[in-house]
């Protein structure tokens, strides 16, 4: 009835607005029918509108009553992945519920006006699924227990808000839909345990659905007997549940094929086999578990190597005699350093303000075509800003030359990135491999070095790790990490594979600049022995700053001692 009335309204509006009613007798005849229906249309429309408004009032009252604690949250609260997931989930569900009620033509225009006026859009199902996948990534990387997460605990932080069975079910379902049976088992078991803790009137899910997905997930992981037992419980609860009987037959047939006699189908249950599929094709030969160990800070410390590291003041350029740069060497062979307090709060704020309206999903280079593509191993948003955007950006790029001794004429624009829930970038190289012969690369060269500015200090996680050489850099606001991507002869340094670990708690903003080979012929020349490596930034063969002031032996005049 509702859609019939709406259709009549649309016909009326169309006919009234038409400039050529006379050209169609059929449309003229429709006017007669519509005219008779006008009073009825208006009366029924008012009734429907009143009913719709009452439903909206009910939603608002329910929202105020049940979710009042959300209104008390500070913006920084959502830097906790559990709180962020709750907020995204609630807003997604609420907005869907509201949108279903607001369907009238006037209301549609009202919705458009709201959307145009809002600076931040409401999250959708894709956002919710992304938040769930991010939470699962954090669970794996930092070895977080399912029960702890369901109880609102992230390591030593407790948000004092537990998940119910429906929350756990939705996380398990999202994993199941991605064919991630490892996580679907973990979360469906948790949902099953919590089901009867829900009061009957608040059970928005069926236990049958939990048991079904749990049974299938167990089967997919090779736990035939366990899958059969759970499926028995499903049939006992709901004998007509779709495919339940067929699944029992399937499990029994496979047990028989495996040499299990019928009397032993439901006894002598072996230990649970719930292996985690790593899906590590994107990181080639790198051990993904080793990468996660680095993210947890579990790398083995080589005392001999650590004892050789040191800090120094970089003063090898004239200007730096007046304002030296603090440098901490965190790695030799290959050289990696951190410039301390190298970017200022005001500069960080400007970079973030410029990039915020431009943030888009980060892309990665396709290993075959070299084209930018969306990948599962890079979860962040980024924006590109060049020196013409703001004088501060030009100032920062100019500072790069003082920091690195490299020519920044062909440096790429600054890339500002922000990482969300479980945001990370898997192990990769910054230098190119497949498209070295592209026109751009032939003209300005490969990415000889990377400078990574840290604009925030995450509370937990978010390390930059070099996976092959087992080196960790912990992000600290105002600092910058620097390393060379290439050997002096231009070949890729395979030891520079690195990754951005998932952010567990807090916020992570970074800005990176890739410096190209163009113009580096004299500041980083290739010697007779291309295997010779830098011992400090700008090393041209002078004494190490560990024992001597870092002053260039080639400088002349008042700037030299």
Image: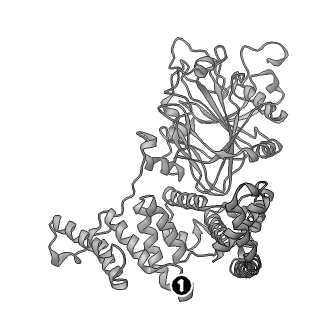
**Label 1 packing within 10 angstroms: few (<14), some (14-19), many (20+):** few
The number of callouts visible is: 1
Image location of residue 356, percent across then percent down? 75, 47
Q: Note whether residue 103 is visible.
A: no
Establish if 412 lies above or below 279: above
Secondary element at tag 1? loop
Establish if 149 lies above or below 55: above
Q: Note whether residue 311 is visible.
A: yes
Could you tell me which residue is drawn at 59 percent across and 41 percent down?
A: 363
Could you tell me which residue is drawn at 48 percent across and 47 percent down?
A: 291
Left or right of 87: which side holds 187?
Answer: left
Image location of residue 423, percent across then percent down? 59, 52
312, 388: nearer the viewer: 388
Could you tell me which residue is drawn at 85 percent across and 16 percent down?
A: 558
Quarter of the C terminus within the rendering: top right
Quarter of the N terminus within the rendering: bottom right
**For mark 1, what is the residue?**
198
107, 193: nearer the viewer: 107
Left or right of 10: which side holds 372?
Answer: left
Image location of residue 406, percent across then percent down? 69, 23
């Amino acid at each position: 009835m509702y859609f019939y009335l709406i259709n009549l309204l649309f016909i009326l509006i169309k006919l009234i607005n038409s400039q050529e009613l006379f050209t169609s007798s059929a449309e003229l005849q429709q006017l007669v029918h519509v005219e008779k229906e006008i009073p009825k249309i208006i009366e029924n429309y008012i009734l429907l509108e009143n009913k719709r408004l009452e439903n909206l009032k009910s939603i608002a009252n329910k929202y105020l009553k049940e979710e009042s604690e959300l209104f008390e949250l500070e913006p920084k609260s959502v830097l906790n992945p559990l709180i962020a997931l709750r907020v995204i989930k609630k807003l997604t569900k609420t907005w869907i519920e509201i949108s279903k009620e607001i369907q009238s033509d006037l209301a549609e225009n009202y919705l458009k006006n709201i959307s145009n006026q809002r600076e931040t859009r409401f999250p959708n199902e894709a956002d919710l699924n992304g938040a769930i996948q991010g939470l699962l990534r954090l669970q794996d990387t930092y070895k977080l227990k399912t029960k702890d997460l369901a109880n609102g605990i992230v390591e030593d932080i407790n948000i004092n808000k537990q998940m119910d069975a429906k929350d756990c079910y939705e996380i398990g379902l999202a994993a199941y839909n991605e064919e991630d049976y490892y996580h679907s088992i973990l979360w469906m078991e948790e949902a099953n345990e919590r089901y009867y803790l829900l009061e009957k009137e608040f059970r928005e899910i069926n236990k049958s659905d939990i048991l079904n997905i749990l049974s299938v997930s167990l089967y997919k992981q090779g736990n035939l007997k366990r899958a059969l037992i759970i499926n028995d419980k499903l049939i006992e609860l709901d004998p007509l549940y779709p495919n339940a009987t067929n699944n029992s037959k399937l499990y029994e047939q496979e047990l028989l094929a495996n040499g299990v006699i019928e009397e032993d189908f439901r006894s002598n249950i072996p230990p649970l086999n719930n292996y985690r599929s790593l899906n590590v094709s994107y990181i080639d030969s790198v051990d993904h578990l080793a990468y996660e160990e680095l993210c947890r800070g579990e790398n083995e410390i080589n005392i001999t190597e650590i004892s050789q590291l040191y800090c120094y003041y970089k003063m090898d350029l004239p200007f730096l005699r007046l304002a030296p740069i603090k440098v901490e060497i965190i790695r030799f062979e290959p050289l990696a350093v951190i410039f301390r307090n190298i970017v200022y709060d005001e500069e960080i704020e400007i970079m973030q303000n410029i990039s915020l309206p431009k943030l888009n999903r980060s892309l990665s280079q396709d290993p075959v075509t070299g084209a930018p593509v969306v990948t599962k191993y890079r979860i962040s948003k980024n924006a590109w800003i060049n020196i013409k955007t703001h004088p501060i950006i030009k100032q920062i790029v100019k500072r790069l030359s003082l920091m690195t001794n490299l020519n920044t004429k062909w440096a790429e624009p600054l890339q500002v990135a922000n990482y969300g829930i479980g945001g990370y970038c898997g192990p990769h190289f910054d230098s190119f491999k497949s498209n070295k012969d592209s026109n751009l690369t032939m003209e300005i060269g490969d990415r000889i070095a990377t400078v990574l500015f840290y604009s925030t200090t995450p509370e937990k996680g978010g390390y930059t790790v070099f996976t092959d050489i087992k080196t960790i850099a912990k992000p600290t606001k105002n600092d910058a990490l620097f390393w060379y991507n290439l050997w002096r002869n231009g070949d890729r340094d395979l030891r520079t594979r690195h990754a951005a670990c998932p952010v567990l708690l807090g916020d992570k903003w970074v800005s990176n600049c890739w410096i190209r080979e163009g113009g580096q012929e004299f500041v980083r020349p290739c010697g007779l022995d291309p295997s010779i490596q830098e011992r400090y930034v700008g090393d041209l063969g002078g004494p190490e700053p560990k024992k001597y002031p870092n002053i260039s032996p080639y400088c002349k005049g008042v700037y030299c001692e």
